[in-house]
């Protein structure tokens, strides 16, 4: 007969613990007989069970599979797959090599998805993860920390909830930390093996965990699971929390319980889920972003539900029971917080333009620059979402005001600002011809010049320029001492470099001596002009009345020897060219018939009209209500949105 894997003293402690747990369960069961679950939830003994073995999709956002972290994540994922053949795993990552690694390591039941919202540093957004998980066609969706190991009672608990509850539900379980876990899965991922190479019974494994676990950041590593249906998890919009940076799990549980859309219960005592403890992460600006959001949205810091009062799922003698400690939610026992404690401080990121450029620039040291104020925040986001869809990540945002800076930080954009930004920017009145427009445009050339002097090429693009495909390979093919820019000429025939027809809202500049010298002249001219920047561009580079024009599509600035090339309007049309914005199917005409790279939404006055035209055309990639980029898995939502 084999000796136990645990010494006698440990087993004695385990028995004492079991006696205490049994007493606790009996007391709670007695209490349970005098209480009932919330009136919004019913559990019927005669309820016809759903699928006995529900399909389960597990979603996680792993770190790179390198070293100890990679080994821990690999063990965790194998523990999930070992639970049931009905489990599929989706890993959220931008790592281009993860798909091949996952296929060779885990097999066909694990896939990698990058079609999600990430910050410029690669941190996934929690609200985007939840939205993708809710779009799953499986019976149950699970969100889990990639280091968390699951044991078989996780499946039995899910099966019980799925088959016995006749109400939509949300289950959560706090993950425990263990400092040492001397077990591994066998080659078939069916049995746990001890240090002596022998199989370990699940009961022994759970006993080991019960005696060695501790709570370290338990709320940050919760397991969340819910049945998939048309019902949302909670009322309202989920803020753009940064995943793994604190508070988002507590926030969504709190809102779900207060919304009363679903039956919310705590399965911590019924499920064995744990992770190997490690050094706690330092608090960063990303954690402060989540703290800021939790104070701005929802009711977490007004009324935070006390988890001890929540309905709990317990396992007694291999039978699951729900225990409701209170007959009704007792809001008097909830903790109260002052909202202003978390929302007054301005957010910022520890990056300047000098530190952002080497992080973001592509292999050619090229940056795509956008300049925006808060009134154009939705156009900015649609623009960035479009670039992300085109797999363009070397973009940078200059904030014209504090509001757009903070908005960009919350949206995970690489953003910077300086003390020379214009003030008093009008929300609805900063369009072509206004004094506000003049101030804003004069900033553009100054910022571009500064980046060129730091040794980076710049493609400046207004946020109302819609990109059909990546124009960088084409634009960068022009040699140094060439500045290529969009033409604002609206006539179908004739020269496109006529006076004042250079559009300074879309141009590509090399970081060479000729370009820097020419742009210094533009900045100086604009500073002394009472007009916008655009006339200064043309008058400086092409000469007043176009005296430096060459042919119908070029100019030559004589002092710097810079050639200005006006881009083909079939490939880079402005907003008045051939009435493209009035076409029934703008995308088809531009892409299929003309081969457009971009289409500028200019030649229209007013932010509101500009926004309406772009929305109406379908050239839009951002969901303003959820603050997420529109994704392929949101097909039904996109259709209703437009």
Image: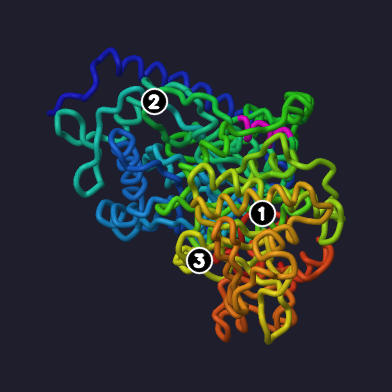
Q: Give the Cα separation between the discs numbered 1 and 3.
A: 45 Å
Q: Which residues are magenta?
A: 288-295
Instruction: Please name the residue that numbered disc 3 is placed on.
Output: 475
Point out which mark residue 274 bears.
none
> Which quadrant of the view contains residue 501?
bottom right
User: Dot 2: what SS?
Assistant: loop
User: Dot 3: what SS?
Assistant: helix
Of mark 2 and mark 1, the one earlier in the sequence is 1
Q: Foreground residue, 143 or 597?
A: 597
Q: Residue at x 75, y 34 (%)?
A: 328
Q: Residues within 10 Å of mark 3 (few under 14, many from 20)?
A: some
Is 211 situated above or below 459? Answer: above
Of mark 2 and mark 3, the one earlier in the sequence is 2
**Where residue 637 appears, x then y in whole percent?**
66, 66
Instruction: Please name the residue that numbered disc 1 is placed on.
Output: 232
Instruction: Please name the residue that numbered disc 2 is placed on.
Output: 277
């Amino acid at each position: 007969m084999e000796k136990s894997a645990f010494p006698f003293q440990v087993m004695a402690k385990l028995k004492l613990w079991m006696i205490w747990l049994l007493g606790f369960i009996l007391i709670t069961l007695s209490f349970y007989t005098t209480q009932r679950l919330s009136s919004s939830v019913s559990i019927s003994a005669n309820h016809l069970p759903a699928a006995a073995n529900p399909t389960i999709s597990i979603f996680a956002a792993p770190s790179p599979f390198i070293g100890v972290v990679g080994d821990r994540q690999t063990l965790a994922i194998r523990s999930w797959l070992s639970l049931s053949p009905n489990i599929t795993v989706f890993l959220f990552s931008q790592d281009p090599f993860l798909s091949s690694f996952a296929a060779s390591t885990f097999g066909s039941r694990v896939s990698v998805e990058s079609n999600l919202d990430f910050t410029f540093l690669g941190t996934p957004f929690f609200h985007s993860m939840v939205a993708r998980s809710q779009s799953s066609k499986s019976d149950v969706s699970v969100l889990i920390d990639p280091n968390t190991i699951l044991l078989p009672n996780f499946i039995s608990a899910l099966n019980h909830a799925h088959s016995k509850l006749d109400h939509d539900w949300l289950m959560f379980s706090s993950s425990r930390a263990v400092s040492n876990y001397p077990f591994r899965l066998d080659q078939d991922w069916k049995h746990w093996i001890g240090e002596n190479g022998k199989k370990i019974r699940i009961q022994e494994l759970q006993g080991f965990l019960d005696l060695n676990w501790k709570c370290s950041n338990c709320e940050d590593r919760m397991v969340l699971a819910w049945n998939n249906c048309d019902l949302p998890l909670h009322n309202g919009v989920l803020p753009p929390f940064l995943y793994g940076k604190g508070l988002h799990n507590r926030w969504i549980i709190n809102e779900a319980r207060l919304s009363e859309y679903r039956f919310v219960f705590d399965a911590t005592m019924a499920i064995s889920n744990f992770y190997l403890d490690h050094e706690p992460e330092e608090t960063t600006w990303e954690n402060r972003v989540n703290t800021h959001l939790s104070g701005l949205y929802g009711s977490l810091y007004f009324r935070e539900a006390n988890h001890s009062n929540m309905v709990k799922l317990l396992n007694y003698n291999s039978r699951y029971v729900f225990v409701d400690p209170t007959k009704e939610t007792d809001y008097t026992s909830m903790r109260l917080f002052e909202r202003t404690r978390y929302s007054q401080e301005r957010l910022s990121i520890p990056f300047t333009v000098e530190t952002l450029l080497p992080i973001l620039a592509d292999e050619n040291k090229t940056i795509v620059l956008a300049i925006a104020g808060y009134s154009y925040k939705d156009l900015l986001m649609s623009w960035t979402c479009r670039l992300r869809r085109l797999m363009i990540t070397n973009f940078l945002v200059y904030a014209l005001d504090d509001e757009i800076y903070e908005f960009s930080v919350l949206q995970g954009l690489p953003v910077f600002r300086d003390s020379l930004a214009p003030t008093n920017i009008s929300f609805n009145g900063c369009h072509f011809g206004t004094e506000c427009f003049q101030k804003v445009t004069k900033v553009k050339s100054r910022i571009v010049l500064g980046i060129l002097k730091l040794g980076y090429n710049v493609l400046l693009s207004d946020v109302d320029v819609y990109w059909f495909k990546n124009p960088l390979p084409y634009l960068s093919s022009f040699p140094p001492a060439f500045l290529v820019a969009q033409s604002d000429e609206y006539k179908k025939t004739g020269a496109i470099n006529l006076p004042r027809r250079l559009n300074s809202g879309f141009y590509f500049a090399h970081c060479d001596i000729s370009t820097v010298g020419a742009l210094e002249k533009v900045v100086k001219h604009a500073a002394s002009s009472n007009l916008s920047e655009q006339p200064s561009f043309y008058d400086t580079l092409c000469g007043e009345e176009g005296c430096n024009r060459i042919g119908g599509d070029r100019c030559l600035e004589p002092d710097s020897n810079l050639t200005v090339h006006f881009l083909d309007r079939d490939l880079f049309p402005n907003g008045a060219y051939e009435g493209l914005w009035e076409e029934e199917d703008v995308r088809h005409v531009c892409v299929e018939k003309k081969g457009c790279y971009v289409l500028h939404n200019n030649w229209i006055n007013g932010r509101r009209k500009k926004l309406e035209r772009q929305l109406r055309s379908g050239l839009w990639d951002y969901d303003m209500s959820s603050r997420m980029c529109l994704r392929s898995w949101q097909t039904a939502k996109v259709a209703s949105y437009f």
